[in-house]
Image (cartoon, rainbow, N blue to C red):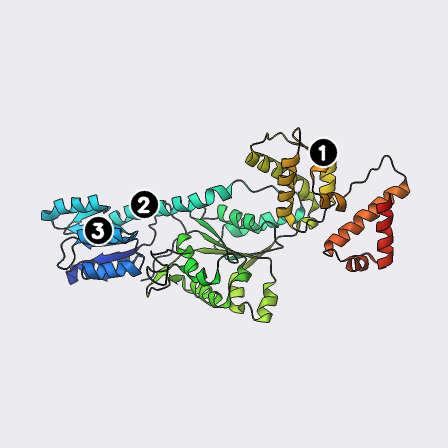
Amino acid sequence: MRATRTHRILGNYMRPLNILVVDDELALRQITADTIARHGHTVETAGGGNEALEKLKVGEFDICLSDIRMPDLSGLELIERAKALKIETSFLMMTAYASVTTAIEAMKLGAYDYMVKPIRHEDLLNRLGQLSDIIGLRSENETLRNLVMAAGDNHCPSQSPAMQHLDRLTKKVAVTDSTVMITGESGTGKGVTARNIHKNSLRANAPFIPVNCGAIPENLLESEFFGHAKGAFTGAIKIKKGLFLEANHGTLFLDEIGELPLNLQVKLLHVIEDRQVRAVGSEASKPVDVRIVVATNRNLEEMVKEGTFREDLYFRLNVFNLEIPPLRDRLEDIEPLTHFFVRQEAKKLGLSESIDIEPEVIELLNGYHFQGNVRELENIIARSLILAEDNIIRTTDLPTHVIRSGTPLNLTDTSLREQVRQFEIRVINKAIAAADGDRRIAANSLGLGLSSLYRKLDSGEES
């Protein structure tokens, strides 16, 4: 049964659970399963311990609600064998009053708790709610351990009108549950924008799971996305939850979505439409409630025309587009970003946060093309801090290619003719950088002949 949809982990909502009910009495098994299913959980049943163990091996269950006394395999033996197989399922035991001592023994083996038959439905739902909270905390703690080093305070207030407009759009879409596509050149900060969407959303207390679609080997993509059952393929020695279930109730950020192969694009489309995932090697589908945010530096519209990206998936993902402009188109942000990265990198290196920057450094950076955008600026600052002496970043601490392409003008000690010549050299170098080093293209963009461009460059090198 499909689970009730919810947008929050906290409050009066209980997260949907995947539960296995085990009892050799058919009537009790069906009544219990129906009660649980009516409250939005996915339920499977087993008529005995052996059948339950086989289902636990191939399917991921949050909770196994099991009777203790069963003719083929007792509840105690079921727990022992499941633990030996490293099956990470919480056990809640059911027992008759006369077997309470055995139930306590089950708790020593690792069961969460036990309930005495006949079981009141209200008590059962309360106990499942308690277990749901514990399972949720366990999952969130694991997610936090993976993300705490990468998260940090990586947001710098923008000064440029283009980025201030983007920030306003980000805040507007964040409070909705809309799917978002973030586009822009590599290094512009698409991941930072995705994280800001999550932090300002109703899902902020739930997991934020970032995934680089281009970094996962193609043969492992389906397993990583949707999980796998134990024994589904060679090397699948235990059940894997999958990224969609890891992000359940939260945000799944699919970076470099253009790298996703066509066969996975089809399956991703089905998950978005059906809101259910099925692990590799499993026949059962599980409900999932995840907000999708994607990012790409590729032209997906062109990929659709070429047949390398599905048109139906493109329209499913491109509900709300946020385009991040390159750093060279928002020069107002270079200085505040520079100071921000100086503070951030100084903290990483264990340096004093009172680092000074020569004014000429900012002037050089303002004149540089930044092919790698914000990420390149961050790397330049990290390198400069390593070289800096006396807590001062000087022009000599910058990489050579930055100095050459953005030489600042000395307006006090040179003639007007020399100032014009220096300015021409700066403009030409920026045009060459924009043309990826092709001087013919640079000359055309400046309206110069190639020989004129070389002559002006040669005059600059002679002086």
In terms of secondary structure, where does tag 2 sit? helix
Residue identifier under label 1: 358
What label does residue 134 carry, if any? 2
Residue 71 sits in quarter: bottom left
Residue 284 placement, left or right of 116: right
Q: Position of residue 428 (x, y in %)?
A: 80, 51
Q: Which is in the foreground here, disc 2 or disc 3?
A: 3
Q: Which is in the foreground here, disc 2 or disc 1?
A: 1
Measured in 3D between alpha carbons, the distance from the residue under mark 2 to the one under mark 1, in whole angstroms, is: 53 Å
Report how many numbered discs are placed on residues in the image. Answer: 3
Residue at the image point whose x is 59% and y is 67% from the top:
303
Q: Which is in the foreground here, disc 1 or disc 3?
A: 3
Measured in 3D between alpha carbons, the distance from the residue under mark 2 to the one under mark 3, in whole angstroms, is: 21 Å
Measured in 3D between alpha carbons, the distance from the residue under mark 1 to the one under mark 3, in whole angstroms, is: 67 Å
Q: Is residue 318 visible?
A: no
Q: Position of residue 214 (x, y in %)?
A: 53, 58
Residue 144 placement, left or right of 378: left
Q: Amino acid at mark 1?
A: Glu
Residue at the image point whose x is 40% and y is 52% from the top:
246
In terms of secondary structure, where does tag 1 sit? loop
Precedes in sequence: disc 2 or disc 1: 2
Residue identifier under label 3: 80
Q: Are marks 2 and 1 in contact (CB under 8 Å)?
A: no
Residue 263 placement, left or right of 413: left
Q: Position of residue 94 (x, y in %)?
A: 17, 51
Q: Position of residue 44 (x, y in %)?
A: 26, 61
Q: Are marks 1 and 3 in contact (CB under 8 Å)?
A: no
Q: Are marks 2 and 3 in contact (CB under 8 Å)?
A: no
Foreground of the two, 153 or 422: 422
| Mark 2 closeness class: few <14, some 14–19, many ≥20 residues within 10 Å | few
